[in-house]
């Protein structure tokens, strides 16, 4: 059995001794025949009590004044003597469940439960799985899919070359693991999940019809018990591939009728189905543009029948020219999402959501916020994050990514106050600027697999935990979220060890950035794999990801004055900030500007000296982590300790490779020696 994540034995013990009673005020049943009931039994390891007088925790459903279906209140009432009774109240069973988890979390963290209420900041709190039906996971670093495949070995598979097994049942069928996963997700408020990869290959296109749909429905029922709606990623060409039609043109009546039938069939099998997630006209996936139509035509065509059942269509904005010629300096990939979708603002149906990656490129260790967020005024919006660490160290290198995500959700888009009500930060405008706020929120690409600890590196669990918490409580800090996770995950670690782990994790995102591509320029990774250094791996390739280093300088000129003009896509204040080299933040300098190596940063260092210093510092920090981790030994479970210890050794090799290749490359380019005379392999 896999290790539970943060809902571990000690956490359950923290709430032990409590007797839980549940009442649904709508039906008056006691205890309610609640689909979540099985879960409540799980948390405490025993059934609900049937006598309210015997309960010290009472879940009460459906008698609050909250507008939100998800909000809950926890309050304590003192009886005679020492007795304290806790009431957890919400409008729905899911809300009561969220409250129950919050109660456990607060007990574990030593926080008061006397009077606490909470509502989620984001409506859709979604996990996207990039799982393939063959059991592999695109960009997965924690073993095979928990949903599909049943292959004997647990080795990483290259998804592009791994053959589908024709005819075999693609489902793994490990329902216990799926239930454990659903419980963990619900405990941090996740309420939506896409089962399969947005690159819909082979039999994955068949998931939406019988017979595979029946198996999908079994999984949907498990998630539904935890308040999580299931979504499927679909292939836009399915009417041809599956339906035998001659076209997938979204305006063709036969195509529309076909989708409508398919969607009716899904709702017959899964009455609370969430909807579709669509990657169309992107990186070779089929889409409406092949038929001279646009994204709005494609999305709205699906949204109509979906809307009849209360479902939604999530349409991805990750659309760009992936066959660029590196010689062509007029095309800038960073501009693509805005160029493709801004003209369609206001034209999508009420139940269509545009899912936009937070950065304009692709989940790099440092990117500005995409200008599309804050520009759209009439389109439902979801921001996409990548929990799986594609460009962030593959869950080999420690990388607690909340500091980066929160800097994105806290970024002020400068969208005008008359539209936003005065708060232009991403976390506020996602619901505020979405015409139908129920169809807005955050999505995170999953980082779990069949590995015993779910995430490959135990510490990578914190990113999944943190994603859920960030969706719910937008003002929580990277520190507070980490402290919660540490208290739930290593409750017996003791002060010194907790401090050591905390120190590693809180600095890990910056450390990783320090030894990777400098100052926001991005990529420089091994092509395809995206782990490890390859300075010019993408420099002469078709993906639009260039650094333009020469003997004089480095960086991408995205200014209006002399570059690609990308900066103009931002609202005026931000456009002006990024247009001017002097007001561009240091860490994004090379994203926006091409500067000489001698350019002086706000820190007072030259660019070249900054490159050397950060790369020496990044690699040295990993040595410090290894030492700190040694001091943790014996304070946490040995398996967890060994898991991270082994990965830190690999991280060390990775960091050294980055340090030396980057330093050598830029030394050879610039001819400028390190001020401190450290070893650079000239
Ligand atoms: O950056 C790319 C990843 C692909 C991914 C794509 C996307 C699912 O390398 O693996 O495909 O982004 O987000 O669609």
Image (spheres, rainbow, N blue to C red):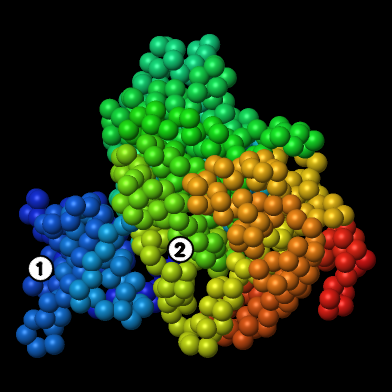
Q: Position of residue 90 (x, y in %)?
A: 19, 58
Residue 670 lies left or right of residue 410; in this view the side is right
Residue appearing at x 65%, y 74% in the figure: 645
- Determine crowd level at label 2: few under 14, some 14-19, many 20+ residues with C-alpha closer than 10 A: many
**Direction from residue 6 to residue 514 in the image, left or right:** right
Tell me the CA gap for discs 2 and 1: 37 Å
Label 2's element? helix
Q: Quadrant of the C terminus?
A: bottom right
Q: Which residue is mark 1?
A: 51
Instruction: Judge whether residue 511 can be spotted in this image.
Output: yes
Which badge, 2 or 1, comes first in the chain's sequence? 1
Residue 466: image tag: 2
Q: Which dot, 2 or 1, sits closer to the camera?
A: 2
Please provide percent x and percent y for residue 328: 76, 34
Q: Nearer the viewer, residue 95 or 591?
A: 591
Res 642 quadrant in image: bottom right
Q: Evaluate whether residue 210 shows in this view.
A: no
Q: Nearer the viewer, residue 420 or 197?
A: 420
């Amino acid at each position: 059995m896999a290790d539970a994540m943060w809902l571990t034995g000690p956490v359950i013990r923290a709430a032990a001794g409590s007797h839980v009673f549940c009442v649904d005020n709508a039906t008056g049943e006691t205890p309610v025949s609640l689909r979540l009931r099985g879960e409540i039994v799980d948390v405490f390891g025993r059934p609900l009590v049937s006598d309210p007088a015997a309960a010290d925790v009472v879940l009460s459903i459906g008698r609050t004044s909250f507008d939100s279906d998800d909000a809950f209140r926890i309050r304590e009432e003192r009886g005679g003597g020492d007795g304290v009774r806790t009431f957890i109240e919400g409008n729905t069973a899911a809300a009561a469940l969220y409250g129950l988890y919050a109660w456990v979390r607060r007990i574990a963290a030593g926080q008061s439960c006397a009077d606490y209420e909470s509502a989620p900041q984001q409506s859709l709190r979604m996990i996207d799985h990039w799982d393939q039906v063959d059991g592999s996971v695109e960009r997965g670093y924690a073993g095979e899919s928990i949903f599909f495949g049943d292959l004997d070995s647990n080795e990483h598979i290259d998804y592009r070359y791994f053959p589908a097994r024709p005819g075999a049942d693609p489902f793994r069928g490990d329902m216990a693991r799926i239930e454990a996963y659903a419980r963990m997700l619900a405990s941090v408020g996740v309420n939506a999940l896409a089962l399969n990869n947005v690159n819909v290959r082979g039999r994955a296109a068949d998931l939406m019809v019988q017979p595979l749909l029946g198996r999908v429905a079994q999984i949907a029922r498990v998630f539904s018990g935890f308040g999580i709606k299931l979504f499927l990623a679909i292939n836009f060409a399915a009417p041809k591939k599956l339906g035998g039609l001659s076209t997938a043109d979204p305006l063709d009546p036969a195509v529309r009728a076909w989708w409508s039938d398919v969607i009716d069939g899904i709702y017959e099998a899964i009455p609370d189905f969430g909807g579709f997630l669509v990657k169309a006209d992107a990186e070779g996936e089929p889409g409406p543009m092949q038929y001279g139509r646009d994204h709005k035509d494609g999305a709205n065509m699906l949204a109509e029948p979906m809307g009849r059942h209360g479902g939604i269509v999530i349409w991805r904005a990750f659309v760009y020219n992936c066959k660029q010629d590196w010689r062509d300096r007029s095309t800038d990939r960073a501009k693509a999402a805005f160029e493709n979708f801004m003209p369609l603002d206001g034209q999508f149906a009420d139940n269509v959501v545009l899912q936009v990656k937070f950065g304009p490129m692709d989940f790099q260790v440092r990117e500005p916020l995409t200008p599309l967020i804050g520009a759209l005024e009439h389109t439902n919006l979801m921001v996409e994050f990548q929990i799986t660490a594609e460009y962030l160290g593959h869950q080999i290198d420690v990388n607690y990514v909340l500091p980066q995500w929160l800097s994105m959700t806290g970024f002020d888009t400068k969208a005008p106050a008359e539209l936003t009500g005065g708060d232009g930060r991403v976390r506020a405008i996602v619901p505020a600027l979405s015409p139908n706020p129920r169809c807005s929120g955050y999505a995170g690409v999953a980082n779990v697999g069949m590995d015993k600890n779910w995430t490959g590196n135990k510490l990578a669990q914190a990113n999944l935990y943190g994603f859920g918490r960030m969706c719910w409580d937008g003002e929580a800090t990277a520190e507070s979220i980490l402290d919660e996770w540490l208290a739930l995950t290593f409750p017996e670690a003791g002060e010194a060890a907790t401090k050591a782990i905390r120190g590693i994790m809180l600095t890990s995102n910056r450390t990783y950035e320090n030894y990777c591509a400098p100052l926001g320029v991005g990529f420089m990774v091994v092509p395809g794999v995206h782990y490890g250094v390859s300075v010019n791996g993408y420099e002469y390739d078709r993906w639009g990801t260039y650094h333009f280093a020469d003997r004089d300088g480095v960086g991408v000129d995205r200014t209006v004055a002399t570059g690609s003009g990308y900066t103009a896509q931002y609202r005026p204040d931000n456009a002006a900030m990024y247009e001017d080299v002097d007001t561009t933040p240091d860490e994004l300098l090379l994203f926006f500007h091409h500067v000489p190596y001698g350019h002086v940063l706000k820190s007072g260092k030259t660019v070249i000296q900054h490159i050397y210093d950060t790369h020496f510092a990044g690699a040295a920090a990993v040595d410090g982590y290894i030492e700190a981790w040694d001091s943790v030994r014996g304070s946490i479970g040995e398996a967890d300790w060994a898991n991270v210890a082994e990965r830190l050794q690999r991280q060390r090799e990775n960091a050294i490779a980055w340090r030396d290749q980057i330093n050598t490359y830029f030394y050879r380019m610039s001819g400028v020696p390190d001020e401190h005379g450290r070893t650079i392999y000239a």
